[in-house]
Image: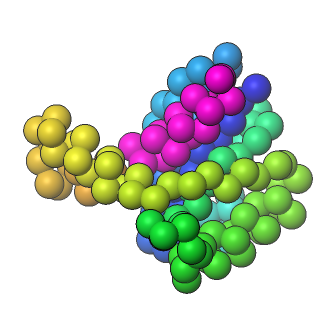
Amino acid sequence: MRILGLDYGEKRIGVAICDELGLTAQGLPTIIRKTKKHDWGVLENLIKDYKVEKIIIGYPVRLDGSEGVQCEKVNRFTTLLEATFSLPVVKWPETLSTKEAEEILINSGVRWEKRKKMVDKLAACLILQGYLDSIAK
């Protein structure tokens, strides 16, 4: 089963896909948001090309477990994903995934200019891998 992982953002959407066995997440090119038509077209192509059966989207709950403004945006986006692509969408807690991705890149010696381009993809990988690890147990 191929699962698509998303790190939703207002300017960019980080994207990852799992291998066919559902064991590991690999990053795909980040979607630079332009228009709704463009964004949905890119997602549609990814879903078709990889034969995606499920989508995991990062759900940014606060450290205290409460939902903030960004959760409302993810909820709206999730509703549209489900309606548009008729696929199950799982909201996966992703608190601090972007911060963790940035720290990994910094510790790997990646320069700031490249980090900015890679952080959303890596965050999507962390979200998807967290989900994959949880279902493997």
The front one of 77 and 69 is 69
The residue most toward the top is: 21
What's the magenta region?
120-137
Q: Residue at x 25, y 41 (%)?
A: 104
Residue 27 visible in the picture: yes
Residue at the extreme bottom: 69
Q: Is residue 75 shown above or below 97?
A: below
Q: Does residue 46 show up?
A: no
Task: Give me the residue at 67% from left, 17% from top.
Answer: 21
Residue at 82% x, 49% y is: 88
Q: Where is residue 49 in the image (x, y as percent from the top left)?
A: 70, 35
* Predominant secondary structure, magenta span: helix
Q: Nearer the viewer, residue 104 or 137?
A: 137
Left or right of 81, for residue 127: left
| Percent x, y of residue 1 | 76, 26
Q: Quadrant of the C terminus?
A: top right
- Is the image coloured rainbow, by chain, by secondary structure, or in one colour? rainbow
| Residue 109 painted magenta | no
Q: Position of residue 95 (x, y in %)?
A: 46, 59
Q: How many numbered marks have been drawn onto this rendered protein structure?
A: 0
Residue 134 location, quadrant: top right
Percent position of residue 37, x then y: 67, 69
Left or right of 76 on screen, residue 97: left
Q: Is residue 34 above or below residue 88?
A: below
